[in-house]
């Protein structure tokens, strides 16, 4: 009874941002996975639980491949993949790994990293990888769809207005950080799209998460977008970890296929995971499973 009371208290509050202390030295492993039991007589979709832990749908489905997106079954365990390997990049500004659909913000002058889930560009409207900066910020942005977007919607039988005014019904949400002439990190009026390929190339966040960035990220901050479905690290104690996400489809054939998208292992990752000190069976199972959670691959660990 006490457990369910705690759940009610927890789920009545709104998660805003997940803030981790940066690990010491050359460590890149942060956090610990969390787990809850879905309450009795659950009536909430997966998005409801995901939002409470600031998770995206893709991360939740990687960690819980059998969960029902629309109505998770009562009394079943739900894993929240809150242990991560930091991207192998500079710990400066904003890093967005489109492959794992997460944004990392390193506030200047602190030993912290803020991790938030994002939605990205759909197939054919891919979010590009490049280095830019926050050019400007806007509270209550309006949205002017391009002619190409209006034509796309018209082909679906939907007529959209020339301008979406600022407000709760605006697909841009309530806040926006513009990172280029055609792209922005912005909120949304459709939270179910966080952790999915759903935009026309922009980065979407839940409005609460975007407000946190809006309030804390100054104009001029460096922004780097990367596409790294596989992350690996060697921790100070010598243990090696591997984190594998399902790569983004690059063709309609891949997108519509039930076969897994092939994984490319770059040389810097190969040097870590194809080393004599690692358990090859664990590595192979991690690559096949693609759980999006760090797995210890040191030789002392056995495949399950």
Image (cartoon, rainbow, N blue to C red):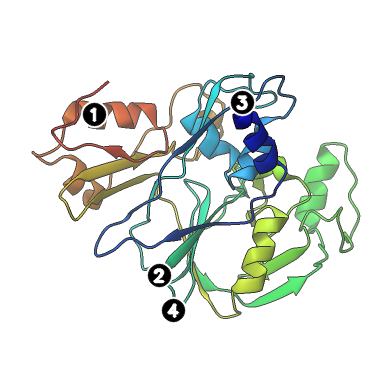
**Nearest to the observer: residue 22 or residue 97:** 22
Name the residue carrying label 1. 282
Q: CA distance from mark 1 to mark 4?
A: 38 Å
Give the numbered dot on residue 38.
Answer: 3
- Badge 3: residue crowd in 10 Å (few <14, some 14–19, many ≥20): some
Disc 1 versus disc 3: nearer the observer: 3
In the figure, 299 relative to 168: above or below? above
In the image, residue 176 lies at what x, y percent? 71, 66
User: Residue at position x 87%, y 60% from top?
Assistant: 167
Disc sitting over residue 109 in the figure: 4
Q: Which residue in the protein does label 2 denote?
A: 111
Disc 4 from disc 3: Cα separation: 39 Å
Badge 1 or badge 4: first in the primary sequence: 4
Residue at disc 3, secondary structure: loop
* Among the two numbered marks 1 and 3 on one chain, the one whose residue lies closer to the N terminus: 3
Name, please, the residue furthest toward the front.
2
The quadrant holding residue 60 is top right
């Amino acid at each position: 009874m006490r457990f369910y009371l705690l759940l009610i208290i927890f789920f009545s509050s709104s998660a805003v941002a997940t803030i981790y202390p940066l690990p010491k030295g050359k460590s890149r492993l942060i956090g610990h996975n969390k787990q809850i039991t879905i309450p009795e007589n659950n009536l909430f979709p997966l998005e409801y639980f995901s939002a409470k832990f600031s998770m995206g749908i893709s991360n939740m489905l990687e960690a819980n491949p059998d969960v029902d997106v629309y109505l998770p079954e009562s009394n079943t365990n739900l894993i929240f993949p809150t242990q991560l390997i930091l991207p192998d990049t500079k710990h400066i500004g904003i890093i967005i790994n489109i492959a794992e659909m997460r944004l990392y913000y390193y506030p200047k002058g602190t030993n912290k990293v803020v991790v938030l889930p994002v939605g990205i560009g759909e197939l054919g409207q891919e979010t590009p990888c490049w280095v830019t900066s926050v050019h400007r910020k806007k509270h209550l942005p309006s949205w002017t769809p391009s002619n190409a977007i209006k034509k796309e919607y018209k082909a679906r039988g939907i007529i959209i207005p020339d301008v979406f005014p600022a407000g709760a019904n605006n697909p841009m949400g309530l806040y926006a950080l513009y990172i280029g002439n055609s792209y922005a990190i912005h909120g949304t009026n459709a939270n179910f799209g966080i952790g999915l390929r759903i935009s026309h190339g922009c980065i979407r966040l839940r409005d609460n998460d975007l407000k946190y960035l809006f309030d804390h990220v100054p104009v001029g901050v460096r922004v780097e977008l990367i596409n790294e479905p596989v992350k690996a690290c060697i921790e100070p104690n010598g243990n090696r970890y591997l984190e594998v996400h399902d790569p983004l489809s690059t063709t309609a054939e891949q997108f519509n296929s039930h076969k897994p998208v092939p994984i490319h292992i770059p040389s810097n990752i190969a040097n870590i995971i194809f080393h004599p000190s690692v358990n090859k069976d664990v590595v192979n199972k991690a690559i096949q499973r693609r759980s999006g959670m760090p797995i210890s691959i040191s030789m002392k660990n056995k495949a399950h």
